[in-house]
Structure formats: structure tokens, C-alpha cells
């Protein structure tokens, strides 16, 4: 296998995932490599060649709820973003967290599992990519507007990762955001524990998600009594996504 860590970023076109104050929020558009890698994995599975162990490539495309999450943050910019510390869980491309930075967050941590995947880099080519390295590259695309953005490993429920973040942010984060992370109920316990561990005393949690199996609402309800639902919006008639905004009750 040939490894050339920066090749995909160099080839990938830039994509604007939002316009904030007239300026684009940019990421490397690696969606094509995501779809090619899915086909690579499927083909290897059929052939039994064993090269289809590409890893979890879901973080290399922007999922459908990210624009909804960004729009929600923009609408409530003054109250839940500006001047606040923000962490994005399961950041993937970092589209939502980078938008929070552009909206005036004091600091943004883009967090995700620290894993390496194999992507289809071109005809007959494969490339190993670090998910966190890709997040850092997307942050660099945004120049000064991402000056207060950092990248950190956070596998949900991982004691070492949570301890490291708590050491760096002992008062917790003012806003916790996550988009398209409620697809598997098997991850709910670890995700809920992670949110509770990282949210500050007066934190707001913003979750954007499509309703796939009905368990999403139960997850949000399960954040009580630590958090109370204060806002909920759908993306429109017949839309398959919703944004839920929960906040720690005042003490």
C-alpha cells in the first residue's frame, strides 16, 4: 500500500459549507473519496481479498444534518456561540465546529475518534488518512477565522480522552454540538456520558439529527435531569432532520 498523507487534501477541491458574515467556511471536499472507499470495501468483501478493511470513513463527508446545525447556531449566535467555548463531538469534517468559530466562539475543539482509514485516492491507488489530521487540514483552510480552533481525540466514553479534555478545560465547555451522531443506539450510553462529562455548569447542548429509527428522541429525553429541552425545530415539512437544544437547569 502506498502512503502519501497529503495527496488527497492536495487534490480535493475546497467546499464552502456555510457563508458567515459574507465569508465562506471551507473544508476539503473529500466526499468523492468517501464514496470511492465504500465501493472499494464492498468490492474487496465480494472478492475476499482482505483489502476492504478501510475503517470507518463516515467522517469524510458532510452529512445531511450539518447545515441544519449550522443554521441553528447562526440564529442563536449571540446566546450560544459568541464568546463561548465550544466542542464538537464526532466532528467528521469539522463543518459545524468551524462554522461556530466563524460565528465568534471564544475557542472551538473539533473532536473525533483518533483513527486511521484507507481511502481510495484514485484509480488503483489507496491512501491512509488520519481523521484528526484531516480535521486539522480543514481548520487550516480557514486561516485567521480558525485561529482559536484546536483538534483533540475523543472516543465517546474513553476515560483517558475525557480526562485529557477535562484537564485542559476544567470548567467544561459552554456549548456542546454534535451533528448526525445518533444513528446507532449502541453508542448512546457512551455519548451521553461524554456529553455530561464535558458540558460546563451552564452549558447548552445542540444536537442535529435525522430521525432514522425513533430512538433519537429517547436519547434526548435521557439527558434529563442533567439537561432540560429548551428548543426543538424541524427542517421543514417532511424533513428528516431536527435540531434539539438542551440546557443545564439553572441552579
Image (tube, rainbow, N blue to C red):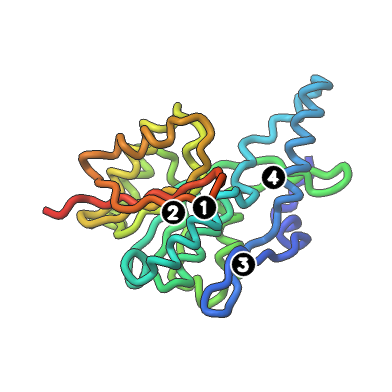
Q: Which residue is mark 2?
A: 88
**In the image, 213: left or right of 42?**
left
- Residue at 34% in and 38% down: 192
* Nearer-N-terminus badge (4/3): 3
Q: Which residue is mark 4?
A: 128
Q: Nearer the viewer, residue 59 or 170?
A: 59
Q: Nearer the viewer, residue 48 or 28?
A: 28
Q: Which residue is mark 1?
A: 235
From where the camera sits, is residue 178 visible?
Answer: no
- Density class for disc 2 (Cα within 10 Å; few <14, some 14-19, many ≥20) is many
Q: State the residue lying farthest toward the right.
A: 123
**In the image, 166: left or right of 60?**
left
Q: Which residue is mark 3?
A: 26
Real-space Cα distance between discs 4 and 3? 22 Å
User: Are circles 1 and 4 on residues that touch, CB within 8 Å?
Assistant: no
Position of residue 63 measured from the top left corner of the image (x, y, whole percent): 60, 48
In what element is the residue under mark 4?
strand
Classify residue 185 by image quadrant.
top left
2 or 4: mark nearer the eye: 2
* Nearer-N-terminus badge (2/1): 2
4 or 3: mark nearer the eye: 3
Q: Nearer the viewer, residue 77 or 149?
A: 77
Real-space Cα distance between discs 1 and 4? 36 Å
Please determine whether, in this image, residue 123 is positioned above or below residue 221.
below
3 or 1: mark nearer the eye: 1
Please determine whether, in this image, residue 174 is positioned above or below residue 63.
below
- Residue at 51% in and 56% down: 68
- Residue at 39% in and 69% down: 77
Position of residue 241 measured from the top left corner of the image (x, y, whole percent): 52, 46
Amino acid at each position: 500500500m502506498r502512503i502519501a498523507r497529503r495527496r488527497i487534501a492536495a487534490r480535493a477541491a475546497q467546499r464552502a459549507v456555510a457563508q458567515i458574515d459574507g465569508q465562506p467556511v471551507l473544508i476539503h471536499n473529500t466526499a468523492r473519496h468517501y464514496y470511492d472507499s465504500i465501493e472499494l470495501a464492498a468490492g474487496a468483501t465480494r472478492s475476499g481479498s482482505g483489502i476492504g478493511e478501510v475503517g470507518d470513513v463516515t467522517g469524510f463527508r458532510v452529512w445531511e444534518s450539518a447545515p441544519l446545525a449550522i443554521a441553528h447556531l447562526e440564529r442563536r449566535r449571540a446566546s450560544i456561540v459568541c464568546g463561548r467555548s465550544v466542542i464538537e463531538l464526532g466532528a467528521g469534517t469539522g463543518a459545524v465546529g468551524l462554522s461556530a468559530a466563524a460565528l465568534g466562539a471564544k475557542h472551538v475543539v473539533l473532536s473525533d475518534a483518533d483513527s486511521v482509514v484507507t481511502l481510495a485516492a484514485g484509480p488503483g491507488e489507496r491512501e491512509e488518512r488520519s481523521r484528526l489530521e484531516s480535521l486539522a487540514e480543514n481548520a487550516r483552510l480557514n486561516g485567521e477565522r480558525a485561529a482559536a480552533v484546536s483538534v483533540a481525540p475523543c472516543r465517546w466514553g474513553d476515560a483517558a480522552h475525557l480526562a485529557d479534555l477535562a484537564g485542559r478545560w476544567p470548567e467544561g465547555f459552554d456549548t456542546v454540538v454534535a451533528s448526525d451522531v445518533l444513528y446507532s443506539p449502541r453508542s448512546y450510553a457512551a455519548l451521553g456520558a461524554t456529553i455530561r462529562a464535558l458540558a460546563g455548569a451552564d452549558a447548552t447542548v445542540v444536537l442535529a439529527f435525522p430521525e432514522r429509527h425513533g430512538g433519537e428522541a429517547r436519547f434526548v429525553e435521557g439527558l434529563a435531569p442533567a439537561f432540560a429541552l429548551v428548543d426543538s425545530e424541524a427542517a421543514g415539512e417532511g424533513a428528516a432532520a431536527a435540531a434539539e437544544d438542551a440546557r443545564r437547569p439553572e441552579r
